[in-house]
């Protein structure tokens, strides 16, 4: 395949995507629903939470492997965790909307869940033999213990 035919094929694919109204409608609808359920103000904190979940999963898997306790069923817990956390964040967002409180409860929920993940990451790092700053773990634990 020469350069010109490759460009022609790429142009054809792009042309099909541009005129594929079904895909545009699907993605527009999906983005609208996600924006309504999670709000647009907290995209970065929610993204950070997802990164923390991923890091916790990776470190937890390494710890389990090193301790000969790795089980694929436990790995599925992460998928369930993302679903449950998402539901909790949506519930907090809907509550914020219903009481006209801004993002107080949603942000509190994201902070709480992020603190859980952070503490778990620090504990897993300790199990792998790496030192972690005790003060940071204590501060995250304090966030969890506030009522």
Image (cartoon, rainbow, N blue to C red):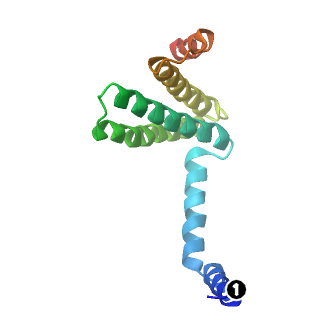
**Residue where numbered disc 1 is placed:** 3
Provide residue 80's location: percent of width, then percent of height: 37, 41
Nearer to us in this view, 42 or 3? 3
Please report the residue visible at 40 percent of the width from the left and 39 percent of the height from the top.
Answer: 78
Quarter of the image where one finds residue 18: bottom right
Number of marks drawn: 1
Q: Residues within 10 Å of mark 1 (few under 14, many from 20)?
A: few
Residue 2, placed above or below residue 76: below
Residue 134, placed above or below residue 75: above
Nearer to us in this view, 76 or 95? 76
Please report the residue visible at 60 percent of the width from the left and 58 percent of the height from the top.
Answer: 32
Quarter of the image where one finds residue 134: top right
65 lies left or right of 119: left
Residue 41, placed above or below residue 129: below
Please report the residue visible at 34 percent of the width from the left and 42 percent of the height from the top.
Answer: 76
Please report the residue visible at 51 percent of the width from the left and 27 percent of the height from the top.
Answer: 117
Q: Residue furthest front?
A: 2
Provide residue 133's location: percent of width, then percent of height: 61, 13
Nearer to us in this view, 62 or 118? 62
Provide residue 54's location: percent of width, then percent of height: 50, 38
SS for dot 1: helix
Provide residue 13's location: percent of width, then percent of height: 61, 82
């Amino acid at each position: 395949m020469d350069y010109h035919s490759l460009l022609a094929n790429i142009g054809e694919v792009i042309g099909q995507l541009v005129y594929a109204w079904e895909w545009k409608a699907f993605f527009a609808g999906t983005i609208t629903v996600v924006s309504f359920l999670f709000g647009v103000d907290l995209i970065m904190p929610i993204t950070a939470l997802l990164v923390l979940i991923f890091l916790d999963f990776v470190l937890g898997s390494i710890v389990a492997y090193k301790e000969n306790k790795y089980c694929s069923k436990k790995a599925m817990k992460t998928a369930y965790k993302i679903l449950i956390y998402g539901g909790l964040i949506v519930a907090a967002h809907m509550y914020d909307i219903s009481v006209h409180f801004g993002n107080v409860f949603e942000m509190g929920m994201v902070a709480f869940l992020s603190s859980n993940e952070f503490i778990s990451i620090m504990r897993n790092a300790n199990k792998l033999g790496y030192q972690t700053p005790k003060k940071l773990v204590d501060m995250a634990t304090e966030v969890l213990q506030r009522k």
